[in-house]
Image (cartoon, helix red, strand yellow):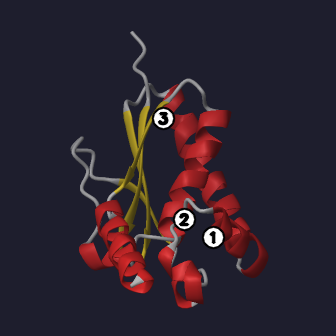
Amino acid sequence: MKNTLHITIQSFSYRKGYPEDPTGNGGGFVFDCRGILNPYRFGDLRYLTGKDKEIEDFFMERTKMPDFLESAKKVISISIEDYLARNFSDLQINFGCTGGQHRSVYSAEQITKYIREKYPQVEITLNHTNAENWEEKISTEENTNTV
């Protein structure tokens, strides 16, 4: 009987530590996005996340993010194809950055799209482990700025 490969993709903040692997397999990939220019340092981009179009434009126009993601896709694809051929059930892919708001979120979102298109037979869970922190922070800062 063939197992379905389940891939968990996560963004995280290095300040909060590495995500745990509940499957007991000991993890998977951890990509460090901190080498990519941080949009947090650029005015109003600070209040956005890796899900926003302005952040995507920033990464595409001002950083090496496209190269970073292409390299990640190549490495990840090797394991996905091997895991599928060997009937493995779980793979975890993590992207970390300083605050878990911009670079790691964007990377996790883009890799999720890539895997869904290239490997439609796998199941994917996408988790932004620091979302409650940046959502709360953005909400608080927006309320502060409007007063």
Q: Residue at x 29, y 62 (%)?
A: 132
Image location (x, y in percent) of residue 97: 44, 75
Q: With 64 as the anchor, is 147 left or right in this view?
A: left
Question: Looking at the picture, how far across and down is residue 56, in whole percent?
Answer: 67, 66
* CA gap, disc 1 and disc 3: 33 Å
Q: Residue at x 32, y 59 (%)?
A: 129
User: Which amino acid, mark 3?
Assistant: Tyr
Which residue shows up at 60% across the image and 80% down it? 36
Secondary structure of the residue carrying tag 3 is helix
When the figure is inspected, residue 66 is found, relative to residue 145, above or below; the finding is: above
* Residue 49 x/y as whole percent: 51, 67
| Circles 1, 3 touching at the beta carbon (< 8 Å) | no
Helix, strand, or loop for circle 2? Answer: loop
Q: Which mark is residue 50?
A: 2
- Using the image as rendered, state which of residue 60 and residue 55 is in the foreground: 55
Placement of the N terminus among the 4 image quadrants: top left
- For residue 118, the mark is none
Question: Which residue shows up at 32% across the image and 64% down it?
Answer: 130
Hey, what amino acid is under mark 2?
Gly
Q: What type is the residue that disc 1 sits on?
A: Ile
Instruction: Please rate how many residues cluster around mark 3, counting C-alpha atoms within 10 Å: few if below 14, some from 14 to 19, many from 20.
Output: some
Q: Quadrant of the C terminus?
A: bottom left
Left or right of 56, for residue 112: left
Q: CA distance from mark 2 to mark 1?
A: 6 Å
Q: Position of residue 53 (x, y in %)?
A: 66, 62
Q: Which residue is mark 1?
A: 55
**Residue 49 shows in this picture:** yes
Res. 38 visible in picture = no
Q: Earlier in the sequence, mark 3 or mark 2?
A: 2
Asked whether disc 2 touches disc 1, contact meaning CB atoms under 8 Å apart, the reply is yes
Dot 2 surroundings within 10 Å: few (below 14), some, or many (20 or more)?
many
Residue 83 is tagged as: 3
